[in-house]
Amino acid sequence: MNSQKIPILVMGIGNYLMGDEGIGIHVIQSLQEEHFPPSVQLLDGGVGSFYLLEYMHLSEQLIIIDAANDGKEPGTITKLFPKYSSDYPKSLTAHDIGLKDLLDAFYISGKALPDILLITVTIKSLPEQLTIELSPELKKVLPILCEEVKKEIYKRINY
């Protein structure tokens, strides 16, 4: 990766093999069909890791899509503007390094945070077996979620 600034980074987080927990990856895959300007970079963040810090440090505006265990109805889309790790919803622990850990590492580094928008989708639970299939609730909400992310991208492009 080069050290060029990324004006808008859209990062999907999740374990693709754990059904609904991989919703962030499904969104990135769907958005790859779009033709965004070069100022927009899509990133499959997978199960997270500290290697994502480099991308986060280079981004000026960051949109993160992830599953949440926040007690809401499955398929509920929530937008958050986190400033502290405590602003993140409860983790599902299917990631190597959670978003809270990444944000804490960001603070420790002393670097300025980009503008962050976290878009979460409530899921019921983790599947008992490995699967890349989404539940009916999340299959239904995936196109809506992708539209919400696109709106946020274009809002930032036209800012």
Image (spheres, rainbow, N blue to C red):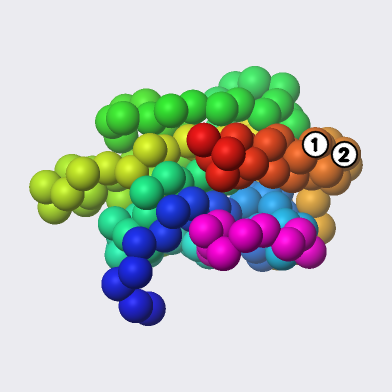
CB under 8 Å between callouts 1 and 2? yes
Bounds of the magenta segment: 33-44
Residue to which mark 2 is pinned: 140
At a point 31% along the width and 50% down the height, the residue shown is 102
Above or below: residue 18 compared with residue 51: above
Q: Secondary structure at mark 2?
A: helix
Q: Label 1 amino acid?
A: Ile
Q: Label 2 amino acid?
A: Lys
At a point 83% along the width and 43% down the height, the residue shown is 143
Residue at the top extreme?
Answer: 72
Residue to which mark 1 is pinned: 144
Which callout, 1 or 2, points to the residue nearer the camera?
Answer: 1
User: Is any atom of residue 22 visible in this view?
Assistant: no
Residue 24 on image: x %, y % = 62, 51
Q: Is residue 43 magenta?
A: yes
Residue at the bottom extreme?
Answer: 1
Above or below: residue 54 compared with residue 136: below
Disc 1 crowd rating (10 Å Cα; few below 14, some 14-19, many 20+) is: few
Q: Is residue 82 left or right of residue 122?
A: left
Q: Secondary structure at mark 1?
A: helix
Q: Which quadrant of the structure image shows residue 138?
A: top right
